[in-house]
Structures are given as C-alpha cells and as structure tokens.
C-alpha cells in the first residue's frame, strides 16, 4: 500500500510516498480503507524529530482518517463492515489502509463529506477532552451563562472547532490571530479577535472582561504562560495543548495560590486506550449532533493528494491556511 513513513527528520522535503505492507488486524480492531487523512501540528513536530510516536505505534505519519471499514477482527460487531467511519489514531493515517481499535472510531456525521470528516475527529476529541473532562466545563447551556474563554490560534483547525464548540455551549469567546485579515475572519465568526502582533492580548481582554476569562485553550506554551495566568479569572483553567512558543517557563506560585488557578497540560495521542474510548463517546454524544445540525462546521481548508504530501506540509508550515489541511487517497 502507499504510505508516508517517518524515515528521516527535517523540513517538508523529507516526506515521500513509499510502498508498505497492509497492517495486520489484532483482536478488537477494524481495517479501514482510507479515503482522506487530516494533517495536524503533531505531524509537523514528528517530522522535525520533536514528537516521537508512542511506544508500539505505527511509524507512518497521521493521527486521523476517514474511510470505509473493509474488515473486522474477532470481538468486533460485523455490522461495522462497509460503514464509513472516522478514526482517531496514534499513528498510521497517511496510508491506504489503517488498523485501529473499533472503539476509537465513530460514524461519519450525516451531511459531512469524507474529506471534511477526515479533519474533524482529532480536533473534536482534543477540544472536547480539554474543555469538558479536563477543565470541567459544563455541556449544559444554562450552566455556562456568563462564562468566557480565550482560544489562541483561532484560525487553525483546533481553534476554529474550539470557537464553534464554545459558542454552542453558551460561552463568550476571545481569540488571537496574527494578521488583520485573520482577525476580520474571526470577527465574522462571532468571536472577539485580537491581533497579537499589534495588541497585548491580556490588556485587550481585561478591557472587556475585567475579571478575566474562565478557560484558556493554548497552543503556544512557555511564551504565553505568564500572560495566560494573569488573564484567567479567579478559579479559572488554563490548558496547554501545544508548545509552539517553547517548553520552559517560570510560574509565580503565589499568584496561582491566591487566585486558585488551575494549570493543565495534555496530549491526546499518548492517552490510554480506555480514555480515548471515553473521550470519543463524549464526542459522539455532545459534538456529533451539533455537526449534523450544521451548528459546528468541519472547516476544511485545502486538500492535497497523498503524492503531494510534501507540498501539503509546506503549505501547512507557511501559516497561510485557515481550517484543516487534508490528504486525499483515491
């Protein structure tokens, strides 16, 4: 089968399609013929040698796919065969076939194309798991009245999904972006956009929400840590899910103690299988109905055929994209 394997590290030029064996099924798994695979920041970090796959995971790139179940293993409902499903992976997505635990798949939401679906499950699971189980945000609209959140990187795949999810949960959203054009786009989506190159986001938020925000979803890391903590409301939650701005920073613990701040740092990829199963059950119950009603859009940005994987990563690296970048397999 065609696949993109982690052979060497560097810029996008190191990526190429090779011929690999079709994965063997283990009990509890399904074999999916992949139609499309989402590209994520984790793939870029892995390509650069900064984010190795968990022990036992495939050395093929890719954390999410959409396609058709071709075969089921022992212990799996045979009715899944022939169904279109999305899958959350620890690796293996940039390939024609992938073997994955059946519990780590969900049906493609009604009204969503297979390409859109391929870029949906990883962002949905990331956003849901960090805001609801991790930060304790309610999924009941009435309980979120007056709540506020800050989402960094609002035009990316995770940022776009997070903004929509929060808004549908009744939470007011502030977000950051790096150009006037991106900020204008985010304003059109109903978020309060802040150009981080022209404004101090902490000051801009405090002007509208003097007490601070309840939740922060952050992909930057160390560079924003001090400002993020200062931007939180007393008892607020900061969740770090990326390290684009570095991994090491100092914390004023007095500030955290006196204001009862909560700091979380999570990775979805390395979670135990049971936790992923529980997260996806929550996504199916809470997020999928919003997608099927059109209240959360998949936000597909651009597609590339698998053979153009290097060009797809070059485009992703450029920062020009809005929404998800997806690889397609015919």
Image (tube, rainbow, N blue to C red):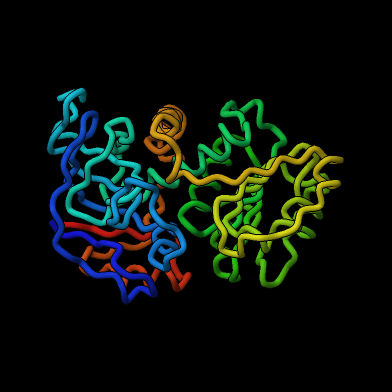
Which residue does the image show at 72% across and 60% down from the upper left?
201
Q: At which x and y percent is residue 177?
A: 59, 64
The quadrant of the rendering that contains the N terminus is bottom left
Horizontal placement of 260 versus 263: left or right? right
* Location of residue 301 with respect to 117 vertically, above or below: below
**Which of the two residues, 5 or 189, is positioned nearer the viewer here?**
5
Residue occupying image coordinates x 14% and y 49%: 22
Q: Quadrant of residue 74?
A: top left
Give the total of numbered labels.
0
Q: Nearer the viewer, residue 248 or 311?
A: 248
Quadrant in the picture for residue 13: bottom left
Residue under the point 66% across and 31% down: 144
Q: Is residue 178 left or right of residue 301?
A: right
In the picture, measured across the screen, residue 101 lies left or right of residue 288, that is left
Residue 211 position (above or below residue 251): above
In percent of width and height, residue 21 lies at 13, 53
| Residue 67, picture quadrant | top left
Estimate the x, y position of residue 130 in percent, counting from the top left.
55, 40
């Amino acid at each position: 089968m065609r696949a993109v394997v982690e052979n060497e590290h560097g810029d996008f030029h190191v990526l190429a399609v090779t011929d690999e064996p079709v994965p063997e099924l283990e009990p509890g798994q399904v074999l999916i013929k992949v139609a499309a695979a989402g590209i994520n920041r984790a793939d870029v970090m892995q390509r650069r040698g900064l984010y190795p796959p968990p022990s036992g995971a495939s050395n093929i790139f890719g954390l999410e796919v959409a396609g058709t179940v071709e075969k089921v293993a022992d212990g799996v409902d045979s009715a899944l065969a022939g169904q279109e499903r999305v899958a959350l992976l620890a690796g293996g997505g940039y390939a024609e076939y992938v073997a994955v635990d059946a519990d780590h798949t969900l049906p493609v939401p009604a009204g969503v194309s297979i390409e859109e679906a391929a870029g949906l499950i990883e962002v949905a699971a990331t956003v849901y798991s960090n805001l609801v189980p991790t930060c304790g945000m309610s999924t009941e609209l009435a309980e979120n009245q007056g709540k506020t959140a800050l989402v960094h990187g609002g035009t990316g795949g995770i940022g776009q999904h997070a903004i929509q999810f929060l808004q549908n949960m009744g939470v007011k959203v502030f977000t950051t972006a790096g150009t006037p054009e991106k900020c204008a786009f985010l304003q059109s989506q109903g978020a309060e956009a802040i150009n981080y190159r022209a404004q101090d986001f902490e000051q801009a938020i405090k002007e509208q929400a003097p007490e601070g925000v309840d939740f922060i979803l952050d992909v930057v890391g160390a560079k924003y840590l001090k400002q993020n903590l200062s931007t939180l409301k007393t008892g607020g939650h900061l969740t770090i899910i990326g390290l684009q701005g570095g991994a090491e920073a100092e914390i004023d613990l007095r500030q955290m103690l006196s204001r009862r701040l909560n700091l979380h740092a999570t990775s979805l990829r390395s979670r135990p299988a049971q936790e992923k199963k529980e997260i996806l059950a929550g996504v199916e119950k809470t997020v999928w109905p919003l997608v099927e009603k059109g209240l959360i859009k998949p936000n597909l940005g651009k597609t590339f055929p698998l053979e153009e994987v290097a060009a797809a990563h070059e485009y992703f690296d450029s920062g020009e994209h809005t929404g998800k970048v997806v690889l397609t397999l015919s």
